[in-house]
Image (spheres, helix red, strand yellow):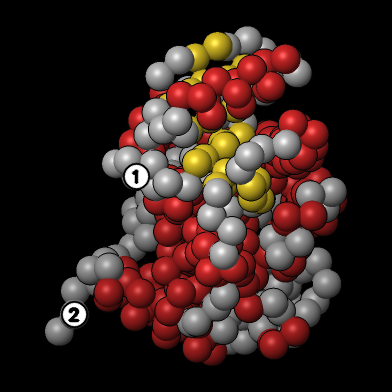
Amino acid sequence: MREHENDSPNILVADDSEASRDLLETLLRAEGYSVACAEDGQEALDALRGQRVDLALLDVVMPRASGFDVCQAMKAMPETRLIPVVLVTGLHSAKDRIHGIECGADDFLKKPVSKEELLARVHSLLRIKHFTDELESAESVLFSLALSIEGKDPYTDGHCKRLASYSMALAERLGLSEELQVALRRGATVHDIGKVAVPESILLKPGPLTLEERTVMQQHTIVGERICAPLKSFRHVLPIIRHHHEKQDGSGYPDGLRGAAIPVTARILQVVDIYDALSTNRPYRQALSPQDALGIMREEAKRGWWDESIINEFEGVLQDQLFVQTA
């Protein structure tokens, strides 16, 4: 595999024809792109693990792994699934194009390749990739900020990671869509991000909060929603951030929602959040057993605080994960 690196976008060209590789490399390098070349599908997959790739041009018919195979593998891996893939092929049947789409291809180029068409498609897909990278960077900043808030309290170490695991499993058990499952995974990390605006004297206060301090603390749901609102990818996360402190009887905050008016994702997060708080050590008490924690939650559900049906489903999740010993 030949490689030419600089700070410009890096394009992977995979083709078993040396003439085709050389042509594509020449055209792309003339436009200022960096190019890495692979002679077959397996070498292309190896290249993806060893360097940054911003776009992949894959010949369809290659030894060891076809372009279809490489594309499908890329779209299945979290670290490469957002890399645009262009299948370069001499196959022109509708069946082949449909197969390429099913494998996750973002675009197609017919052989022989037109220089103008090649550069237009590459430029367009790299522009989209740039926007995607900016979005990922923004999300990473939010996640880092949220985890830094968690890190201020040694008793909440690992809290967000546990919430993500619990809430994803519970959402799957309840049959929620993949989109809402992803929202819960994100929400588990950033649900308390608004606490960045809460003074540490309140955030880490060992005793009960005064009425004034409680009012400041309760603003964190609104602040958190405001922080994350600019990200369109967080549209299903925002209700989790804003409403995870609502209660079934309307006594929660910030909007006093009741019952089914509370988004199901927020109800899920609040159940797993309460369970994790009860089942881990705190300065004022030792961790409760899973059975005792669930017992307290059911008592509170009878008082009109939490959704008892979700608590029941969550117990099933715990049993499935062997967190609770079944009879």
Residue tagged by mark 2?
A: 326
- Residue that label 1 marks: 65
* Quadrant where the image shows the N terminus: top left
- Name the image quarter holding the C terminus: bottom left
Q: Residue at x 55, y 20 (%)?
A: 22
Residue 6, placed above or below residue 323:
above
In depth, the one of 110 and 137 nearer the eye is 110
Q: Amino acid at mark 2?
A: Thr
Residue 93 image offset from top left, x and y in percent: 57, 64
Residue placed at 46% from the left, 24% from the top? 18
Mark 1 neighbour class, 10 Å CA radius: few under 14, some 14 to 19, many 20 or more: some
Q: Is residue 200 above or below residue 302?
A: above
Return the x and y of residue 283 as percentages of the image width and height.
44, 45
Q: Earlier in the sequence, mark 1 or mark 2?
A: 1
| Secondary element at image label 1 | loop
Structural distance between the alpha carbons of marks 1 and 2: 47 Å
Q: Nearer the viewer, residue 56 or 266?
A: 56
Give the residue at x 64% y 47%: 110
Judging from the image, what secondary structure is the residue with disc 2 in?
A: loop
How many discs appear?
2
Is any atom of residue 150 visible in this view?
no
